[in-house]
Amino acid sequence: MIRAYSLSETFSEEGFNLYREMRRKGITPDPLSFSFVTKCCVKRSSVLEGLQVHARVLRDGHRSDSRLLTTVMDFYSSFKRFDDACKVFDEMSHRDTVAWNVLISCYIRNGRTGDALVVFDMMESGHSGSQPDDVTCLLVLQACTNLGALEFGERVRRYIQEHGYGHLRNLCNALIAMYSRCGCVGKAYQMFKGMPNRDVVSWTAMISGLAIHGHGSEAIDAFREMLRMGVAPDEQTFTGVLSACSHSGLVDEGWTFFDHMTTEFGIMPNIHHYGCMVDLLGRVGLLDQAYQLILSMSFSPDPTMWRTLLGACRIHGHVALGERVIEHLIELKAQEAGDYVLLLNIYSSVGNWEKVIEVRKWMKEKGIQTTPGCSTMEVKGEVHEFVVDDLSHPRKKEIYEMLDEIGKQLKIAGYVAEVTSELHNSGAEEKANRLSYHSEKLAMAFGILATPPGTTIRVAKNLRTCVDCHNFAKMLSGVYNREIIVRDRNRFHCFREGQCSCNDYW
DNA sequence: ATAGGGTTAG
């Protein structure tokens, strides 16, 4: 009977039915059977049944079986019942590495990513009573990837090397992702190059990393090399390849891959693939094609899909389609503040100030709160945070003086502020007459100020960067001879010698 | 024999 349960790893339905049969026959499950059936409940999404199993576990007196409780904890975490998961953790009598790992995984799923790093700290310093293992490292690297926490990620890499996990492929794959998403595509590539046996995940991570950095043709080269090496691409690989085409404006290549993924690799396009194509077509101005593609899908577009198209309408000042897209979002009851900001920018980009005022008034009436732009910059392990027109930084006087000085220098080099892009969020409202300082400008000025000449300036921003700040950064990189890497909401902009690796605003 | 896990649109 129990042997059958171990099979239930892959046959959750069968495992679950066996448990029922067991209960019917009045056989008392042992901790092992409980563990199996709990996992089956996760796999077949049976919340209620899982709760019943937990109740039974407690009734049968397995409160001190921490291995079993770890599985139960993961069950709660899987269904986003974080308080329940933490309660199980708190009540455990012993907590081994796996229990701590489940806690980290729970934090990451719950958006408490920073706390995942705190747990790693506790484990490494011995305060938890358990040492991090390879899975801990994998999870914490995921957290670093999400946070863009490069220094912490490097620390985890040292731990990996010092503890003999350096050869583990999944850890190398996670490191490739961490480095790319922290803006170090070069280090990601070194990691990738150093791997003796790359699998489809390694290749996909590398291709996606090149993609978000705007290295479209390198990403496509990597894809071709992957095929030559006999590694079969999967859905995710094509997501990476199409995203590379999108970030680099490679329309023909995009269509070719989009067709080939079905005809030659038998992979049906999913919502991510369509999303990349809509973004690709939209960015280069083929808005109607993008719209038609959405309408041609066999499944319903989600709000994000419409938002992608709305973003393209903003770039190209396409008012009519923009209004239609907003209608679709309203229909889905999914409109957000950011969508109205985009609509505002569409109107302002074509100089329709009446509409701008109308939408803004309407937003005010409805009490729609926009997300304030916020940029962060790490200097010597310390994170400095800036918001639009920020006056809170202790070195604000120096920063604003530096911005004025930079402004003068850039003007000499030919920089002209773009007023339309000033309407980035409500914080910058009605400031079109004077230069408003978006958070990334403040962060960049601080970077020039606080780091020695020649140091790369790394800025992370919570929203998309605007055309004006993008121009500003380009000029800044040339005039001050600095490499500037800005991570915005969905990609990296690497500014060097007056150019950007992206072609979002050409 | 049992627990935790890599890549992934905008």
Image (cartoon, rainbow, N blue to C red):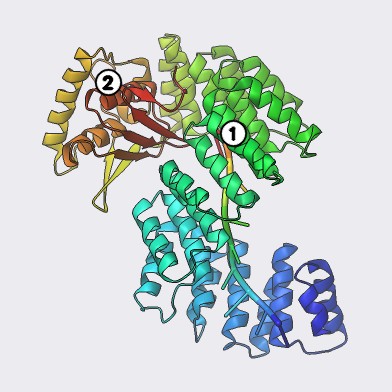
Quadrant of the rendered image containing residue A434: top left
**Residue A114: image x %, image y %?**
40, 58
Q: Residue at x 47, y 65 (%)?
A: A137
Q: Amino acid at mark 1?
A: Asp
Q: Choose top left, top right, bottom left or bottom right for residue A113.
A: bottom left
Calculate the distance from the C-alpha at mark 2 to the C-alpha at mark 1: 46 Å
Query: Residue sitting at 33 percent across and 28 percent down?
Result: A496
Q: Is residue A484 left or right of residue A370?
A: left
Q: Which residue is mark 1?
A: A221
Report whether residue A304 is seen. Answer: no
| Image height of A441 relative to A182, above or below | above
- Mark 1 belongs to which subunit? A
**Which of A231 and A246 lies nearest the eye of the viewer?**
A231
Inspect the image, locate mark 2, and give the three-letter code of the amino acid beneath it: Lys
Q: Is residue A48 above or below residue A482?
A: below
Q: Secondary structure at mark 1?
A: helix
- Foreground residue, A213 or B9? A213
Quarter of the figure that contains the C terminus of chain A: top left
Q: Which mark is residue A431?
A: 2
Q: Quadrant of the N terminus of chain A?
A: bottom right
Residue A405, position in %: x, y? 14, 24
Residue A278 higher or lower than A23, as above or below: above
Q: Residue, x 18% and y 27% (percent of image)?
A: A403
The numbered mark, 2 or 1, whose residue comes first in the sequence reads 1
Circle 1 residues within 10 Å: few <14, some 14–19, many ≥20: few
For the residue labelled by badge 2, is the local secondary structure a helix, a strand or a loop? loop
**Is A49 positioned to the left or the right of A216 in the image?**
right
